[in-house]
Amino acid sequence: MKYTALFASFAAHAAAVSVSGAAEGFAKGVTGGGSATAVYPSSNDELVSYLGDSEARVIVLSKTFDFRGTEGTTTSTGCAPWGTASGCQVAINQNDWCTNYEPQAPSVSVTYDKAGILGITVTSDKTIIGEGSKGTIMGKGLRIVSGVSGASNIIIQNIAITDINPEYVWGGDAITINDSDMVWIDHVTTARIGRQHIVLGTEASKRVTISNSYINGYSTWSATCNTYHYWAIYLDGSNDLVTLKGNYIYHTSGRSPKIQGNTVLHAVNNYWYDNTGHAFEIGSGGYVLAEGNVFQNIDTIVEAPIDGALFTAPSAAENKVCSTYLGCVCQVNGFGSSGTFSQSDTGFLSNFEGKNIATASAYTSVVSTVNANAGQGKV
Ligand SMILES: *[C@@H]1O[C@H](CO)[C@@H](O)[C@H](O)[C@H]1NC(C)=O
């Protein structure tokens, strides 16, 4: 009996630290730290060390790692492009952003937490996974960025990243990917972030899947001064394939997402809810296929003009074209109290040929599925 109980407790522990499911879409096949023995960092320093070393690792977050205050604060002159009312974000003059802002914005003094500005470096072959609802990083983000040959094969699952200088534009990003390949972000919650919740930089980020995650745009301070965060998801890049599936994108007012550079985005079965500005912003080099999503209370689903290309899977008849390139017909999107979303560029669909493509369900099941699954603590 005793042996059985002991075994059961080991089994429970082992189950808690293994990756749940597998990446769908462009990053299918990502293995992260693979079968490496799990490590449980107990301090901020240990977490930073495991994330950035040269070993394949499974890193289990079983508590909150709070970086706020750990690097001190900086006071400098920033600006207030949207005014100084209590609900407005103000900006740090990073890279002369305020100096170059047009029209010139009034100067204000800003005092921000230094830890938030630059995220923790994550190197190749890592699995970062939270235990239950316990794995949280506060006050600092994660950066998957160029090393000598970029960073590849990384899984981030079931954690929350929160409270990165939310008052300040340029206060820090939650997840940065810039020069990488094969990254899977799954069941991650981001909330109260100064700048981008997720940003893919101008370098090639190649194959990325963002799934079942919860972008919580509610913030006391926002660029639109109305609690709706403007800087949600920014997909730039020179050779990027991004799958966005099953995510909950809530209470934002812009860049949800912004796509440009040379980025192909497959947005499938996501739930956008409550946005006072725009969801998509599609710049030059942004190629977007959006199917089987739900847009509820989204003022402007896509901002004009569209400088890239967009296929919104508008009708069963038009959606048959997907069979040639994706191997099955596309699913129409669902709308409630939202703006219009209808465009039929198909020339870029050939980019999907021969790739791993996430499957699409009918939009009718999206709200219940996303509510049940998206975010930390739902695996
Ligand atoms: C990505 O890398 C390029 C080149 O080093 C750099 O100019 C850019 O600022 C980086 N972007 C982000 C979001 O880190």
Image (cartoon, rainbow, N blue to C red):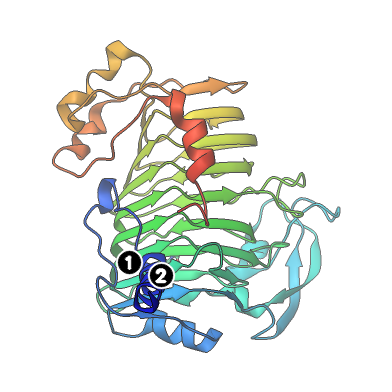
Q: Give the labeled residue for mark 2.
A: 128
Quadrant the N terminus occupies: bottom left
Q: Residue at x 73, y 68 (%)?
A: 78
State the residue lying farthest toward the right: 85
Which residue is label 1 attached to?
154
Rendered location of residue 87, percent (x, y): 81, 52
Q: Helix, strand or loop at disc 2?
A: strand
* Quarter location, residue 133: bottom right
N-term mark: 2 or 1: 2
Image quadrant of ligand 1?
bottom left
| Residue 125 locus on image (x, y percent) | 28, 73
Q: Count of labels shown?
A: 2
- Numbered circle sitting on residue 24: none
Q: Amino acid at mark 2?
A: Ile
Image coordinates of residue 300 in percent, x first then y, are: 58, 29
Q: Furthest residue to the front?
A: 1
Q: Is residue 228 left or right of residue 241?
A: right
Query: Which residue reaches farthest top?
Result: 317
Q: Answer yes or no: is residue 213 visible.
A: yes
Near mark 1 (Cα within 10 A), the count class, few <14, some 14-19 or many ≥20, is: many
Residue nearest the viewer, comparing 257 with 3? 3
Look at the numbered disc 2 and say if its residue's Cβ is closer than 8 Å to ligand 1. Answer: no
